[in-house]
């Protein structure tokens, strides 16, 4: 039982490049989340998916897109990376998107955009 | 709407000192809260849950007590250890929809010998 896994662990991009961050969970959770963590800002929600095939915007969705084609996977895309997207990205999952449900986090992806 | 305000850090304590990290949560509905901990280089993990009904959550020596007069769930530990050095986040339940409120800004704790 690996929990929540993220790939890659580290990534360096040049401005304008695109990439996809991958997240997988093996807990059969219905809901998944993408956050970014910046110094002094805590965690900010980018997008979430309440269930397979559905996605919704979080607090800071601009410049990102997501895909939840399979229940166990949640992909975060950057179409044209900008230096402002330099951050640590965390994926999380929970049994449901509402109510008193604990979120389980992956180890994070550290992204640097030059 | 709901709002959460977390004590700013960093907090530096000596080993065996008493810890309090403040988190004020103004809830329009049923007040309840998670406390998560992030150790260096890792993702967040659940430390404890606290609900008004139970008044207090606890785990690994940490407790979060609901204080009605201030609508707050403060995280406390009677005697901290160096291994408790981490960033602590409070977070209300995630309700989705129009409520995008998730995590407090985090409080960094450093425990020294």
Image (cartoon, rainbow, N blue to C red):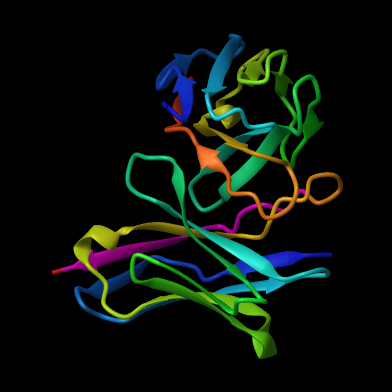
Residue at image x 26%, y 72%?
B80
Where residue B102 appears, x then y in whole percent? 67, 52
Tell whether position B4 is magenta: no
Tell whether position B111 is magenta: yes
Residue at image x 57%, y 46%?
A43
Quarter of the image with the C terminus of chain B is bottom left
Where residue B47 appears, x then y in whole percent? 45, 58
Where residue B92 appears, x then y in whole percent? 66, 60
Q: Quadrant of residue B13?
A: bottom left
Identity of the residue furthest to the left in this view: B113
Q: Is B101 placed above or below B107 here?
A: above
Residue sitting nearer the eye, B27 or A57: B27
Give the side of residue B15 with respect to residue A66, left or right: left
Residue at image x 25%, y 80%?
B17
Identity of the residue furthest to the bottom in this view: B69
Q: Quadrant of residue B56?
A: bottom right
Quarter of the image with the N terminus of chain B is bottom right
Residue sitting nearer the eye, A49 or A80: A49
**Which residues are the magenta region?**
B100-112
Where residue A71 appears, x then y in whole percent? 67, 20
Number of numbered discs on residues: 0
Q: Is A41 placed above or below A82 here?
A: below
Q: Is B79 placed above or below B46 here?
A: below
């Amino acid at each position: 039982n690996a929990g929540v896994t993220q790939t890659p662990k580290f990534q360096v991009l040049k401005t304008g490049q695109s990439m996809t961050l991958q997240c997988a969970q093996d807990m059969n959770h219905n809901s998944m989340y993408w956050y970014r963590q910046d110094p002094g800002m805590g965690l900010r929600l980018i997008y979430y998916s309440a269930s397979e095939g559905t996605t919704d915007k979080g607090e800071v969705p601009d410049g990102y897109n997501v895909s939840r084609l399979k229940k166990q996977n949640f992909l975060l895309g950057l179409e044209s990376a900008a230096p402002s997207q330099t951050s640590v990205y965390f994926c999380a999952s929970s049994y449901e998107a509402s109510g008193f449900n604990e979120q389980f986090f992956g180890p994070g992806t550290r992204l640097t955009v030059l | 709407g709901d709002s959460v305000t977390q004590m700013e850090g960093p907090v530096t304590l000596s080993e065996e000192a008493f810890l309090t990290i403040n988190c004020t949560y103004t809830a329009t509905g049923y007040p309840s809260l998670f406390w998560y901990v992030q150790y260096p280089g890792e993702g967040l993990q659940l430390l404890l849950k606290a609900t008004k009904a139970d008044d207090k959550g606890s785990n690994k020596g940490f407790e979060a007590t609901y204080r009605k007069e201030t609508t707050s769930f403060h995280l406390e530990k009677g005697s901290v250890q160096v291994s408790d050095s981490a960033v602590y986040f409070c977070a209300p339940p995630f309700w989705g929809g129009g409520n995008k409120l998730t995590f407090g800004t985090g409080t960094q704790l450093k425990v020294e010998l």
